[in-house]
Image: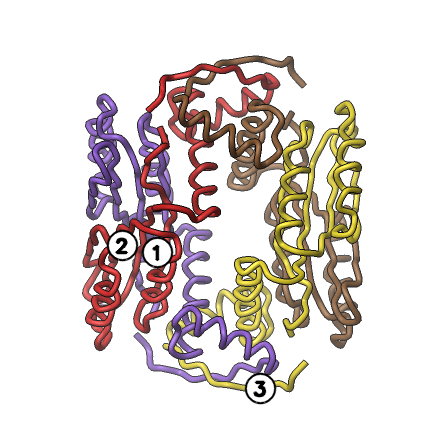
Chain colours: A brown, B yellow, C red, D purple
Amino acid sequence: MGKTIRFGVSLDSDLLDRFDRVCEEKSYQTRSEAIRDLIRNMLVQREWEEAKGELAGTLSLVYDHHHSGLTQKLLEIQHEVHDVILSTLHVHLDHHNCLEVLVLKGPADKIKTLGQKLISSKGVKHGQLGLTTTGQDLL
Amino acid sequence: MGKTIRFGVSLDSDLLDRFDRVCEEKSYQTRSEAIRDLIRNMLVQREWEEAKGELAGTLSLVYDHHHSGLTQKLLEIQHEVHDVILSTLHVHLDHHNCLEVLVLKGPADKIKTLGQKLISSKGVKHGQLGLTTTGQDLL
Amino acid sequence: MGKTIRFGVSLDSDLLDRFDRVCEEKSYQTRSEAIRDLIRNMLVQREWEEAKGELAGTLSLVYDHHHSGLTQKLLEIQHEVHDVILSTLHVHLDHHNCLEVLVLKGPADKIKTLGQKLISSKGVKHGQLGLTTTGQDLL
Amino acid sequence: MGKTIRFGVSLDSDLLDRFDRVCEEKSYQTRSEAIRDLIRNMLVQREWEEAKGELAGTLSLVYDHHHSGLTQKLLEIQHEVHDVILSTLHVHLDHHNCLEVLVLKGPADKIKTLGQKLISSKGVKHGQLGLTTTGQDLL
């Protein structure tokens, strides 16, 4: 972590008014915090484009646990690459539906391949990979 | 849950070849399963556009727990709307960074407002709302 | 157009280094310009979420002009709402394929409905609505 | 272009009802056409992920033509890579604002680099690259 630096941004006053209004709607307390978020989003997007080093992602799966052999299959796929799965959370949405979230950390291609295998399993109704960050070098 | 129906789709053979190849790359075992996934994705997207009834989402937050007062603030925001938060999962990524996932169920606007409040909190490095489904009527 | 205002943003020096590097890769000449772009993107996204007033969009269509009755059908759909279509550009990609771009200005729902009608026409291979802005109040 | 093939898809009847309703809202005349569109979208997305061969895109730019030296600069950037720009369309949105669309065909990296250079130019208010297809092998 480096030291905090302050630099100036010049902007048309009308544009600044609109920006301030949206910041308030989104609950930002300062302009700096909103701009830091815009910058960090841009950097996280770039991390995934470059696909180097360790990345983090969250995979959500909605499925019917009554589907024959499905829970067993999902477990087996996960164990093959257990080293990229930090943890999983399971919620019983109703009598049939489960929502499971996997927190993933590792190389981009390994995370994406795992996501495709789980999402394409028969009985999984909806699957989605959220691209986030390990937070390192992102202060 | 209704009964299973079979219907025909007509497609150019070259296009079908390309589709089959991508299905294989994505680990789909049958064309039907790949097409059901395309259809269900389209319906989940529509659910969020229409924003009616109960929806489900997953919110991921990466933050530094050393940031003064942050964990307390995130907890307070969550307790105000505890009824839309089904569960949360916390992972210690390293000495500084935490990744927290919240599983959310409720009306679209309540889910989005909660997401904006948490994401805009100072000290949260990256936040992201994943739009998924309760799985009801999605067989 | 208001007057130009300068305000300060505080940021960790390591984060600033990463931001500067990505700005350079993306050909930004100053930090201010990159931040103005991030802010304007956020505002354009917000314009489309709020869906008020006049918005602008570009619709691209790729289709085979040999497809029976298609060019006639696309023209008829367009003439029904000619007031939201400012102009169109047509490119002959090869012997079969055409790429057509429509520049649209008007209410959000009218733009979206037109897009869906054209994209869903049989013979259109790929269609896509790009959400942009009339540029007013966006300095 | 191959011959037309017909294959069966099995689906729960409730899911099919929901799919039919959304197809109608989106103006699809047959299920087959809607499914072909879903498949072609998946393939176009894949084309851009793989980034091989010739791809097509549309770049939209909104800018103020009064901005000193801007039109000249945009022209110069375009001429450096004129071979990937098939055509451009210019619309005078109002006294200040222009909307310009460039139709691009070429390698993925060349299209993306050109997009970044133009979008990052000072005076460009909003820029956006739409990823589409040359339509070849997409019947």
CB-based contact (under 8 Å), mark 3 and mark 1: no
Chain holding disc 2: C
**Outermost residue toward the front?**
C53
Tell whether C20 sits left or right of C72: right
Which residue occupies 44% across, 70% down?
A: D25
The correct choice, above or below, for D88 with respect to C37 in the image is: below
Total marks shown come to 3
Q: CA distance from mark 3 to mark 2?
A: 41 Å
The correct choice, above or below, for C77 with respect to A36 in the image is: below
The residue wearing badge 2 is C84
Tag 3: residue type? Ile
The correct choice, above or below, for D88 with respect to C92 in the image is: above
Tell whether C113 sits left or right of A19: left
The residue wearing badge 3 is B5
Tag 1: residue type? Ile
Disc number placed over residue C111 in the picture, else none: 1
Other residues around mark 1 within 10 Å, as few (<14) / some (14–19) / many (≥20): many
